[in-house]
Amino acid sequence: MIPQLKEWQRASGTWTCAFVDKFSPDLDNYVLPARAMGMDLPTFASFVVNKFKPDTVYYNNVLAFGWKSQAKMREYKNFINNIFRKQNFVI
């Protein structure tokens, strides 16, 4: 299965996305984009902050980003989904 990020709007109004189709004890869903890009989490977080300019960054055992603009969030979501497909990143 090639993962695909799904989007939703939080109660706060910010937009986010994540891989939510499968959860299992051996699968850390929030690290999949970093793994697909061959980056450790700090490097990946810096990359996302610099390239996609999220309005919020959250880390507490889960790395999450939020955007006030759905369009800006979709730039990130589409970029990562494209990486998953190009890499044939199967989980």
Image (cartoon, rainbow, N blue to C red):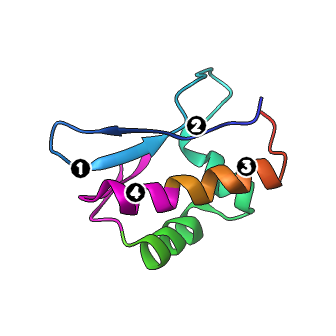
| Amino acid on which disc 3 is placed | Phe
Q: What residue is pinned by disc 1?
A: 14
Given residues 60 and 85, the one toward you in this image is 85
Q: Residue furthest right?
A: 88
Cα–Cα span, label 1 and label 2: 20 Å
Front-most of residues 72 and 45: 72
For residue 29, the mark is 2
Task: Report the side of 20 relative to 15 (left or right).
Answer: right
Q: Are marks 4 and 3 in contact (CB under 8 Å)?
A: no
Q: Quadrant of the C terminus?
A: top right
Q: Which residue is mark 3?
A: 84
Instruction: Residue 32: give its label.
Output: none
| Circle nearer the N terminus (2, 4) | 2
Q: State which region is magenta.
A: 54-76
Q: Residues within 10 Å of mark 1 (few under 14, many from 20)?
A: some
Mark 4–mark 1 contact, CB under 8 Å?
no
Q: Amino acid at mark 1?
A: Thr
Task: Tell me the distance, in whole angstroms, between the alpha carbons under discs 4 and 3.
Answer: 17 Å
Q: Secondary structure at mark 4?
A: helix
